[in-house]
Amino acid sequence: MVAILENTEHNTDFHQIVDFLQAFHIRYALTVSPTVYVSHIRQFWSTARIETADGETNILAKINGKQRTISKSSIRRHLKLNDEEGISTLPDNELFENISLMGYYILPNQRFSFQKGQFSCQWNFLIHTIMQCLSPKSTSFNEFSSNIATALVCLATNRTYNFSKMIFDGMMRNVNSKGKFLMYPRFIEKLLKMSQFGTIKHSEIYPVPFQTQKVFTTLRVNSPSFSGRTVPLFDTMIVQ
């Protein structure tokens, strides 16, 4: 989805987290919305294969007879993520400690699966936006695993998370999956740069879904799993 990063009189209780995302380096990836041609996405995923050469792994595919290549570096460049030195993992104790500071109740035998509904609304919006706009998840949007938890902690503590790696790894898993689906349509269209080969003749356009103002209304309703703790954003997240 394309993220909604607009402050209005109807979402004043979310203004701080919206301001944070507007100012952060992932804003472009959250909001970029190229014209997506259905045939490009179908051709990409039907022909995609993984190839490793000179120590670099790429995804290769043919679109309209032309070979296109996607790599972590091309994702980083075209989505303006600037995360080459970014973090992909955190020590368990640091991850759990920071998630707890956000209002999550960590169990003594806590596993690496977290319930989104335990968080108060601003944290919930941040998690929801990462999941729907950047992550490779396709189901179970009420829970998230350690990769999204690590991204959340990095964002909250002013560290760079390697979103390029998360996106690329998700694409590679999809290439090898028996249940392959047409994931990341807006990112792939942006990366393929097919317009450089002349006029695009295909007429079927994929209507990329946008978040709407309803997302704020939905996230205000506390989930049955809500921890009961309304926790403000970290000081490092407040945009002056």
Image (cartoon, helix red, strand yellow):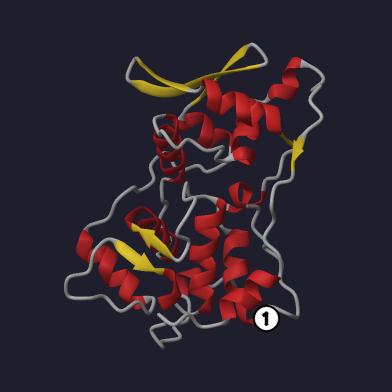
Residue 167 showing in the rendered view:
yes
Callout 1 secondary element: helix
Tell me the residue at 58%/25% (across/down): 44
Residue 234 showing in the rendered view:
no
Residue indicated by mark 1: 12
The amino acid at mark 1 is: Thr
Q: Nearer the viewer, residue 158 or 142?
A: 142
Q: Is residue 154 left or right of residue 134?
A: left
- Horizontal and vertical percent position of residue 89: 29, 51
Q: Is residue 190 left or right of residue 232?
A: right
Q: Is residue 67 left or right of residue 197?
A: left
Q: Residues within 10 Å of mark 1 (few under 14, many from 20)?
A: few
Residue 30 drawn above or below residue 202 = below
Tell me the residue at 44%/82% (across/down): 224
Q: Is residue 221 left or right of residue 37?
A: left
- Horizontal and vertical percent position of residue 121: 53, 78
Number of numbered tags placed on the structure image: 1
